[in-house]
Amino acid sequence: MSAALFRTLLARLYPMPNRDLRRLEAALHDIAWHARADRPPPLQEWDLSRSPRWHTGSEAVAYVAYADLFTRDFGAGPPLRELAARLPYLADLGVTVLHLLPIQKSSGDAGFAVDDYTQVDPRFGTMDDLEDLCRQAHARGISILLDFVLNHTSDLHPWAEAAKRGDPRYREFYVWDETGTGAPWPGVPDIFPDFAPGHWDWVPEQGKYVWSTFYKRQPRKDGPRTGACAQWDLNYANPNVLFAMVDTALQLLNKGVDGLRLDAVPFLWKEPGTACVSHPKVHDLLRVLRILVESVAPGAVLLAEANDQLAGLTEYFGTGPFRGRETHLAYAFPLMPCLWYASAKADTTPLQAVMARMPQLPENASWLVFDEVHDEVSLETIAGLFPGPRGAALNRELFAHFTAEGRGEPFRFDPARQEYGQGVSGTRWSLLDGARAEADGDLHGVEDAIKRVLLHEAFKAAAGGMPLIYAGSEVGLANDPSYRQDPVKAPDTRFLKRTVYPRAAAERAYREGTKEARLFAGVKRILAARKVEPAFRGTRTILLDTPEAALLGFVRPARDGDVYCFFNFGPARWQVSVQTGADSDPESPLKDLLTGLEVLPDQPLELEGLSFRWLKEQPGKKPEPVAV
Ligand code: OTU
C-alpha cells in the first residue's frame, strides 16, 4: 500500500492543513512501529508460518462462544484457563477458529459495554491466560478471534468517567447533543427501540445528552434512570480516538489473537443528514486500520459485523483502489433470514434470489456464513432484501412462525410499529421445534429437527464462506428462560439463548443413539467432508434450476471436478436430474461426498425430505463395476 493512498485516507477523514496531517500520519506510524517492536518473536514466527489466506480455506470453520458459559460446567477455574481443556472437543468437531465473545472488563450487554480494553474481566481470567490460550489453541491448529468493541465504550470506562467530569480531552471522545433537546437526528435507526429507545443517553453530570446507539442508562432527561448499563459511541471524527483504538487493536493482536471481530462497525461515523450507518468514512477508517494491522500482524484478519444490505455489505471488502484491502471477512447477513425462511416455509425462493445476487468477492476475502450467533435472528433483514410489501410479508411470516408455540421470543420489537417484530431470540434447536418435540415425546418431530439442523449445517458449509457454529447448537441446546428472573437481563430476550453448555450434553455427544450424538456426528461428518474438498474453498457458487421451491441446487466449481450441492427443505421426497456442464464427462460417475457412493449423471437423483447431497465430478473416472 503506497504512502500516498494512506495519506489520501487520512486527508479524507480529517480535513486539516498538510502540516497537521503529516503529524497525524506520523503519530499513527509511531503507534504501529511500537507495536511491531513489541510483537513477541514467537508470534512473528507464527505470522511467517501461515498463509495469508487461511480464512478462505475449506478447512476453516468457526465456532462462537462465551468463555464462561462454555466452560462453567467443566471446571471451577477462570474460563480462559478452562477453555484449554475444551479445545480437543472443538478440534474433534472440526473447528479451526474460535470466536470468543467479549472478555474485557465490562459492565453489561454481555460484555459489549467495555470498561477497560487493556484488562481481561476478572470473571474470565487475566491477559496472561489469554496469551496462554492463544498458544495452546495454535498448537491444536485453532485460531482465536476476539471481539473488538470499537464503536462504543461503557459509561464507566475511564474516558467516559473523565468526560463526565468535564475533562475537555475526553469530552471530545464522545458525541454530544449540542441542541440540548435530545431530539433524534432524522433518519438515524433506533436499534433497541423496546428497552433503550433513541440514540441519546442523558448525562446528569454534564446536563447534556451523549450519543448512544445501544444500551442507555436514561434515554430521556425526565425519564427513569433504569438502564442496566450504557454504551457511549466513540467520536471517530476526533483523531485521538483513532489513535487510542488503533493502539488497543494492535495490543490485542500482540497477545496472540488471530483476528478481531469489529463489533457494530456500521455505526462508527456520524454526520448530520445521513442515517449514520455505513458512512463512507467508516470504510476509510477500516482501510487505515487494515494497513496498520497488516504492518504489525500480517495474517491477522478483520471481521466486519455489519447487518447491512448486500450492496452496502460488500463494500466492507473494499472498493476501487481499496478492493481486497478492507475487512477480510464479513458476516453474510443477507443469507441468514432466507435460510430460516427456507426452513420454516419449505421455500427456497428468497434464498435463491439472494444467492443469485451475491457478488464475486476478492480472492483474499470471504463470508462468515451463519444461521445464528449470540444475538437475535435478525428477521428484518429479509424485508430490506425484498423492498415493498413482499419483504414486509416475508418478515411477518417469519416472525409469526418463529414466535409461535414457544419457539422463540420477539426482539427489537418496536412498540410504534406494532405490525411486525424485527427479530426473534432463541436457540436453533428451539426455533426448529426440536425442544418442543422432545418435551412432547414427539419422536417424528425430533427426527425432523435433527434433519433440519443438519440441513442448516450443510448449507452453511457449502454456501461459499467460512461456516460459523454457535456454541451448543451442534448438540441441540434449548432455550433457557431463566434470564427472566434476573432484572438486569429480563428486558433483553437475547439472553434466552445465552445458555450454559452442560457437561451432560458434551457427554451425550459421545454416547451413541442420543440426539446429541446424532447431531454432533452429523455436523462433524459434514465438516470433515468439506475440509478435504477443494471446491469448498473460496466463495464462488453457481445456482442451478430446480423443479420445486423446496429444492435448492448450486455448483461449487473446482479444477479437479465441480461439486453439485442439492438441498431439500421440504418434507416430501423429490427427484432431480444432475445437469452437469457441457465440458463434463457424461460417462463418469459422480461421487457422493458424504457416503462415498457413486451416482451416474444420467440417473435421477433421489432427495429424501429434509436432506441434502453433495456430488463431486470425477473427470475421466469409469463407473465402478456393480457388486453382485
Ligand atoms: C452487536 O450487535 C453485538 O453482536 C451485540 O451483542 C451488542 O449488543 C451490540 O453490537 C452492541 O455492542 O444490533 O442486535 O449492524 O446488528 O452491531 C444486535 C450491526 C445489534 C448490528 C449489531 C448489533
Image (tube, rainbow, N blue to C red):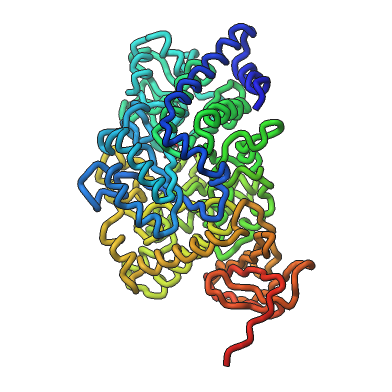
Residue 290 point in image, percent of width and height = 56, 31
Extreme residue toward the left, this view: 76
* Quadrant of the image occupied by residue 564: bottom right
Is residue 217 visible in this depiction of the protein?
A: no
User: What residue is drawn where x is 65% and y is 54%?
Assistant: 355
Extreme residue toward the right, this view: 582
* Of 160 and 533, the residue lying toward us: 533
Is residue 221 visible in this depiction of the protein?
A: yes
* Quadrant of the image occupied by residue 18: top right
* Of 232 and 275, the residue lying toward us: 232
Q: Quadrant of the C terminus?
A: bottom right
User: Going by the image, does 100 lie left or right of 369?
Assistant: left
In this view, 289 is above or below 24: below
Residue 6 point in image, percent of width and height = 63, 22
Residue 493 point in image, percent of width and height = 37, 45
* Of 624 and 213, the residue lying toward us: 624
In this view, 518 is above or below 322: below
* Of 240 and 628, the residue lying toward us: 628
Residue 229 point in image, percent of width and height = 33, 30
Q: Quadrant of the N terminus?
A: top right
User: What residue is drawn where x is 44% and y is 45%?
Assistant: 143
